[in-house]
Amino acid sequence: MKQHVPETREEGPETVDTRLGLRLAELRSERGWSLGDLAERSGISRSTLSRAERAEISPTAAQLNRLCHVYGRTMSRLLSEVEEEPALLLRAAEQPVWEDRASGFVRRSVSPPHPGLRGELVEGRLAVGADIAYDRPPVPGLEQHIWVLESTLDVTAQGVAHRLDAGDCLRLRVWGPTRFRCAGDTEVRYVLAVVLP
């Protein structure tokens, strides 16, 4: 039975997208960058950056990855920075879910957020046929352990392709582009353990 994933936009008066937009604007402001400066560093257009900061749009997974790279953060760390307050226990119903509807990617932050921790667990789900390419890691040398729970996942890193079936686990250090593709005939569900270098 497929689990229902709540829409992040229905979370409350101040949505994750709103808090994310504010945090992205803060990070840019802290560095004294204009939208043009950030566009040049990230490869994302000024208009898209502006709309994301105003929460008119939610950045795609690839765009958020580029911004994480520019700001030297993992995606989980950035998303934890927009959560209300850190907790030691994070119940399943409270785990933040972020969805990139355009690519068919759903990301659940399983670990209780804390900016000082080096490791975290993430649940990823890719719809049938979904294919996400990241042009760079959010943090160079990031260690990832990818454990497939259901279906089949193709992962390409360092130019090497890996096919992972249910139960398989791939460990890698991410230095360059990566690609995640649902290779099965059902949605792929996997656990991603992320460890900062």
Image (cartoon, rainbow, N blue to C red):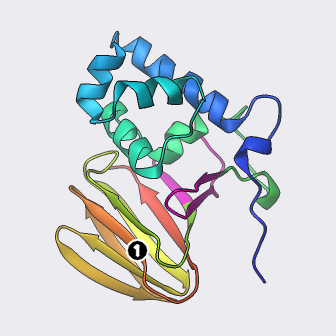
- 149 on left or right of 146: right
Per the image, is 178 magenta? no
Residue that lies at the very extreme toward the left in this rendered image: 159
What's the amino acid at mark 1?
Answer: Arg
Image coordinates for residue 81, horizontal then vertical, percent = 58, 33
Foreground pick, 46 / 132:
46
Classed neighbour count for the residue bearing mark 1: other residues with Cα under 10 Å, few (<14), some (14–19), many (≥20): many
Residue 75 appears in the rendering: yes
Res 82 seen here: no
Observer-nearest of 51 and 186:
51
Image point (48%, 77%), residue name: 147
Query: Relative to residue 10, is residue 119 drawn left or right?
Result: left
Check the picture and name the quadrant holding the N terminus. bottom right
Tell which residue pokes out farthest to the top in this image.
Answer: 32
The answer to which image quadrant residue 3 occupies is bottom right
In the depicted structure, whether residue 53 falls above or below residue 145: above
Residue tagged 1: 181
Question: In screen coordinates, is 189 left or right of 144?
Answer: right
Of helix, strand and loop, which one carries label 1?
strand
Residue 151 place in picture, x, y as percent: 54, 87
| Magenta segment | 98-121
Residue 23 in the image, given as x and y percentages of width and height: 55, 25
Residue found at x 48% / y 88%: 184
**How many callouts does the rendering have?**
1
Tell me what residue is drawn at x 29 percent, y 63 percent. Answer: 178
- Answer with left or right where residue 169 lies relative to residue 38: right
Query: At which x and y percent is residue 70?
Result: 31, 33
